[in-house]
Image (tube, grey):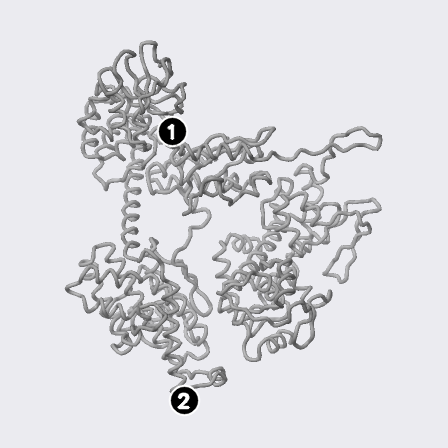
Amino acid sequence: MVTGRDQQVLDARGRLVADESEVAGAGPSVAAGPAGAGTPVAVGPAGADPRPAVTALVRYLHGDGDTLTAAGAGIALSPGFVTARLHGARGDRRDAVLAAVQILGLDGLHRLGERAGVLVALFGAEATKPLAAAAGQAIAEGRWAALQLASAASGVLGAEQLVRLLTLDGPPIDPTPDAAASTMAAHLGRLLTPYSGRRRLDLLLDLWQRVAARQQRLRRDQRRRATQGKHSRLDELTTRYRTHDDALLLDQLRQDLGHEPTVAEAARWFPYAWQAEVSLNRTLADALAATALVRTAANVGDHGVVQGMNRSTALLTAAARAISQEEARAAARRVPGLTGLPARPGCYVRDLAAQLGNPAEQYVRQRLARAAEYAEILLDVATDRLIEFRNQLGGWPSVSLRDWRAGVGYLTGRDPARWAQPPVGGGRPPLAERLRARPGVPPAEEETAGDLFWYAELADALAQLNGHEQADVEYGAHYPYTDHDPLPDDDRQLVPSLDSLPAALAGAAQLVSFGGQPPRQCRAWPELTDRLLAALGVTQRLTTAFRVPEPLLALDGTVLPGTEVRLRFARNARTLTQWATYMGNCIASLPYVEAAEQGESALVALLDEDGRIVVNVKLDQHVRGWRAGEMRARFNADPDLELRRLIVAWAAALPSAPAEEPVPDPEGERLPPARPAFRRRADRTFQEVGGPLARLAADALAAGETVDALRVLHAPDGAPPAEVLTSLRRLSADRVERLCRNKLQAVGLPALWRATSVRPLERALTALPSARTSENAPTTSRTSENAPTISRTSENAPTTARASEDILPPARASEDVRASARAPEYTGGRPQLALLLLDAPLPGSLRKLARHDAIAPARSMELVARRIRAALGRLARAGDPALAHQVARRADTAVLCSLVVAVTSWPPDPALPTVAVSEPGRTSVPGFPRSDLDDPSGPWQRALPGAVELGADLDAFRDRVAGAGLHVPVAWLGHGGWNALWQRAAR
């Protein structure tokens, strides 16, 4: 509707916006004037006094999203005046009425006009009296989430079914701020149209129950986390614990020697088996105490201090018996310069056990505030002890836990009858096998400390405090690998969130937009989403890489000027779907995806300091640069006006893609730029290279060295290489690190390094026949039957690294190709084939080639090898004790040189103390046999490619050697220092 000449429109400051304006809500909807789109205004007769109306407008509208939306409902302000919004406001009248109802309540509905009109705005023209009564009851009781869902579902459900939604007797659901019923209605229409009315209601009722249960769990998790300290003191407490533990070890050493030990005596001292057993028993007691603290914290969070302590009585009593009063007193004794917190968790356990029956709330909460930190410390300490004393366990693995189990039982849903972790010390089958061999025997009768089931229970307790059902536990050679805060797999990250109703509907609708078809027979919400996610069309679409121009890629991760939010560009549809699942908007729908795939637009998320998305932005490419298109906050809300202004200004300043200069011919005429030779259709590349490369890749995969390498990487004999490599390639980064730790213990560092040096795809590419027939065609020379090398007869022939820079953006080329000394020079004038070796999205011309049945597993092995080496680099940077042990005792020169180059190139880190083993500026390296950093045939030059894959910066390495010499972590040097380590490696 458009206001007439006899009406006036005023904003909240009493300023006249327009005499004739299109306004939204009470009738109008947006318009002109200096005010922005969607601004709340008062509309009334031209001759009337507007001051009472403006005062009421300010009183009703406080400036947040809900109250601004409510202005479009036409709330009566004063005689003749109603609220409205200027044209450009998102949503419809239904959204405005819902927002207004929450502000006015049941008694204020008369300000929206006739109740029949309000009912029609919420539920459509077919609303009935029972529906009106149910809606009135929901408003009176403040059940806004039910009212919003019923209004959104009015297009897919009948009046009787809407009454059922409004009278839900299940657990309540918190309303979602800024969520629009109109957006939810669009999602429901996309999802539920194929079903009958009864099935639609069943799905929505099931969704309601699941969201309610999820929100209850979230509130429970929040209460549990609230039992822990707001500020982490993990570093201080770790230092406190380890200092106390070192002091106990030194006391043991003094008792053994009978006097104060010298440094040399301490270095030569080796504990007896009984002394190692004492240390392990102390660690076990501390782990049980930490478990008791964490579980007590969870009980207090769930049930309050009194009930929580009552539920933890048996746990605290049993854990308190594991530490004596003298030990607790020694651990609680203050040490100058260290935190005043007790060194061992058993001190707090004894304090809490003494409070049973009459707990003081402040006293209890103070002693539970560091429970999670004690648990984290004990997981690390227990791991260290199991590695340090694995050859001196004595009788500790057979220590019975019968008394502990008699008091507390088994604490998680983890079944000891399925616990297949190999016991430490060897000589016995896992607990699960022993229980199967003795049916009917209680697990507590068979379990011992060496089964390490207590280790998993400690991780489970910490995981439950973090909001998970269980920790992620994998069996290892010497101890289980645990993750107490596991991330969901990539595919599970796409499962629509159940944190709220709008988020669940938006996530499921995104899957439909990718081509997923709602299943015909579907009775529960998880069945609907799981089948949508499993649809083939969704999977294929998610893997397509976006064409993000280089000027934008260079800004990825930077801060938006004038703000504190960071920019993150979407690289594929999978990322968009994850964004849309959280944001509840349509950024993952096909029009946006197709435009991003073609490079016509770029999709951006602006993240706050906590990593949460604030706004999604669509950047559109124009001839003269970029422009900010659509912008949406969560659930399609409008972003902050100031943030919107900054985004628009930033986008306008972005440079356009550089235009290609025409190439003049010899006679002076300007010719169009030549098309790069590597830009050919994908099917042409596949036809030219597919057959020969597939045969070479298959031969390389069948070679003996490849089979041996796969066996090292945990491929059972007879298992199809493609399946094994695919499963390894799908591992997340943290799982790759666990695999590395497992293999370090099982096969050793040199064997793992050799296995990752086997690259069947690189070998196949190197042997690929030349497609050139000119004089400048490269020739292939072989130094041995299995080791082809490439030599070029022309200096003008492009190298792989240089050609790859033309294909990749400059920053990407510098990082992935130029720095990679592994990339060979390929034959046939096809430098783009080098991209097959990179762990990065492929251009369209290579995707079909990479999916070939014979080539895909070879490429997977290349990527797996690179990821394992990158994981080894991360372990080295973190000072992992398992890796340090392997380097000190088993490394050969190939892996040692690569690791030393990488460590030397990294900036100094207090967490990884190093020592110089060569003089600054000298390339000669001490030790026998002699070696030199610049020797082209020496081990150091041969190690450079591997060092790059570990994460080395070769330029920084040269600078560091020149300024400070070659550096090696102290933890890698045992008796004899560098000279002994080098001699062992060379031998």
Residue found 66% across the figure and 43% down from its top: 807
Q: Nearer the viewer, residue 793 or 195?
A: 793
x%, y% of residue 523? 33, 38
Q: Residues within 10 Å of mark 2 (few under 14, many from 20)?
A: few
What's the amino acid at mark 2? Answer: His
In the figure, residue 806 lies in which quadrant? top right
Residue found 40% across the figure and 38% down from its top: 583
Q: How many marks?
A: 2
Task: Give the residue at mark 2.
Answer: 259
In the figure, residue 891 lies in which quadrant? bottom right
Cα separation between marks 2 and 1: 81 Å
x%, y% of residue 421? 41, 67
x%, y% of residue 649? 50, 33
**Taking the image as drawn, is residue 109 in sight?**
yes
- Tell whether 710 sits left or right of 251: right
Nearer-N-terminus badge (2/1): 1
In the figure, residue 210 lies in which quadrant? top left
Q: Decide: is 683 above or below 369.
A: above
Q: Decide: is 20 above or below 927.
A: above
Q: Residue furthest bottom?
A: 258
**Taking the image as drawn, is residue 715 in sight?**
no
Task: Look at the image and tell me in which quarter the N terminus lies.
Answer: top left
- Tell whether 687 sits left or right of 139: right
Q: Secondary structure at mark 2?
A: loop
Q: Secondary structure at mark 1?
A: helix
- Tell whether 184 sits left or right of 546: left
What's the amino acid at mark 1? Answer: Ala
Task: Look at the image and tell me in which quarter the C terminus lies.
Answer: bottom right
Q: Residues within 10 Å of mark 1 (few under 14, many from 20)?
A: some
- Tell whether 241 sits left or right of 135: right
x%, y% of residue 327? 29, 77
What numbered label is drawn on residue 186? 1
